Image (spheres, rainbow, N blue to C red):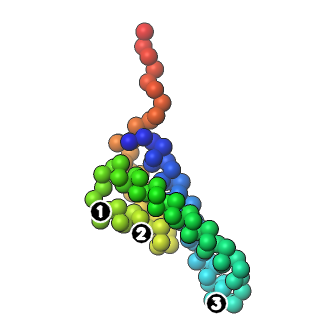
Amino acid sequence: MKKSVLTRYRVMAYVTAVMLLVLCTCMVFKYGFDMGEGVTLVVSQIHGVLYIIYLVFAFDLGNKAKWPLGKLAWVLLSGTIPTAAFFVERKITHELEGSVVDGTPAPVKA
């Protein structure tokens, strides 16, 4: 598996997790303090689009890593649980470190 597959998953995992935390904060302000309704709408839509991109990249990674359905489902759902994507991303990265190859060609020895 190429390193770029894991890298794009990692980036989207972090972006999705951060946006979910921002969305949770917006929801607290919206429902707790009755303010920020417009911001909450925008943030929720942005998170939704980013989560769809995260799903595509995570599914691609799981398909190339040949994960069982349960593991793939857990990785896909981690983008909906605040802070879970941080921990799942770290675990997945450590598991796949040995199977990732760098896309750069090896130097030729003369």
Of the residues shown, which amino acid type is indicated by label 2? Leu
Residue 98: x percent and y percent?
35, 42
For marks 1 and 2, give the CA distance: 12 Å
Q: Residue at x 36, y 66 (%)?
A: 74
Query: Label 1, on which residue?
Result: 69
Query: Label 3, on which residue?
Result: 32
Residue 82: mark: none
Neighbours of disc 2 within 10 Å: few (<14), some (14-19), many (20+): some
Q: Residue at x 42, y 69 (%)?
A: 77
In-front residue for pair 99/50:
50
Neighbours of disc 3 within 10 Å: few (<14), some (14-19), many (20+): few
In-front residue for pair 66/96:
66
Asked if disc 1 and disc 2 are in contact, CB closer than 8 Å, the reply is: no
For marks 1 and 3, give the CA distance: 38 Å
The N terminus appears in which quarter of the rendering? top left
Q: Evaluate whether residue 22 shows in this view.
A: no
Q: Which element is circle 2 on?
A: helix
Work out whether mark 1 precedes mark 3 in sequence or the reverse, and give the earlier one.
Answer: 3
Work out whether mark 2 precedes mark 3 in sequence or the reverse, and give the earlier one.
Answer: 3
Residue 28: x percent and y percent?
62, 84
Residue 100 located left or right of residue 30 = left
Residue 77: mark: 2
Residue 39: x percent and y percent?
70, 77
Q: Which element is circle 3 on?
A: helix
Of the residues shown, which amino acid type is indicated by label 1? Leu
Work out whether mark 1 precedes mark 2 in sequence or the reverse, and give the earlier one.
Answer: 1
Q: Residue at x 43, y 67 (%)?
A: 78
Of the residues shown, which amino acid type is indicated by label 3? Gly
Nearer the viewer's eye, disc 2 or disc 3? 2
Q: Which element is circle 1 on?
A: helix
Nearer the viewer's eye, disc 1 or disc 3? 1
